[in-house]
Image (cartoon, rainbow, N blue to C red):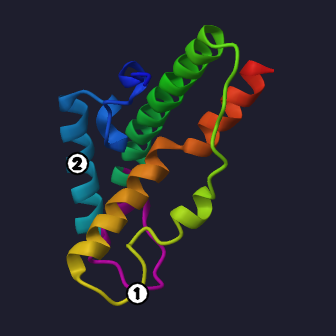
Amino acid sequence: MYDHGEWTSSKGKPEAWLTEKEQAKLLRLEQRAAHRKSFRKRAERTSNRCGRPMTRSKGFVRESSAGTRNWQQQTTTEIAVKYSVLVVEDLAITNMTKSARGGNRPGPREERRAEAGLNRAISQEAWGRTVTMLTYKAA
């Protein structure tokens, strides 16, 4: 059996590509935005002052996404160069992650939480994008 531990993403959370200081700042900005949003009425337009923390936090999220894409590009390039034949299982990813909250089915709450966690993990790893990258790099 092959050990593919070298290609696993140790970055579990979307913000994991940020430093601890940046993660703390992002958390503060998101908390400030949520606090300011609590004073706004339902259909009321957000003022510039209230929207400023969310605008600032978007930069951190964009940087984190760029780190994820960079890791995917480097990993898929390494896989395509290292192996001559690539076999990828045809999974119905959209069906696997239909409900990010764990589905509406009845059952114990713990099971739904576990399913929600799996759905989020699958979505964050972006399997579809990885397969697309492997396809055009191996061609």
Instruction: Provide residue 40's location: percent of width, then percent of height.
Output: 34, 78
**Picture quadrant where residue 85 is located:** top right
Q: Is disc 2 placed on a helix, strand or loop?
A: helix
In-image side of 90 versus 113 (left or right): right
- The residue under the point 35% across, 66% down is 116
Q: Is disc 1 placed on a helix, strand or loop?
A: loop
Considering only order in the chain, which callout, 1 or 2, is on the residue closer to the N terminus?
2
Q: Residue furthest front?
A: 1
* Above/below status of 83 relative to 67: above
Q: CA distance from mark 2 to mark 1?
A: 32 Å
Q: Are marks 2 and 1 in contact (CB under 8 Å)?
A: no
Q: Residue furthest bottom?
A: 106
Residue at image mark 2:
27
Tell me the quarter of the image containing the N terminus. top left
- The residue under the point 45% across, 27% down is 67
- The residue under the point 32% across, 71% down is 37
Bounds of the magenta span?
37-52
Q: What residue type is disc 2 on?
A: Leu
Crowding near pointer 2: few (<14 within 10 Å), some, many (20+)?
few
**Picture quadrant where residue 120 is located:** bottom left
Instruction: Provide residue 17's location: percent of width, then percent of height.
Output: 34, 30
The tag on residue 105 is 1
In-image side of 38 versus 128 (left or right): left
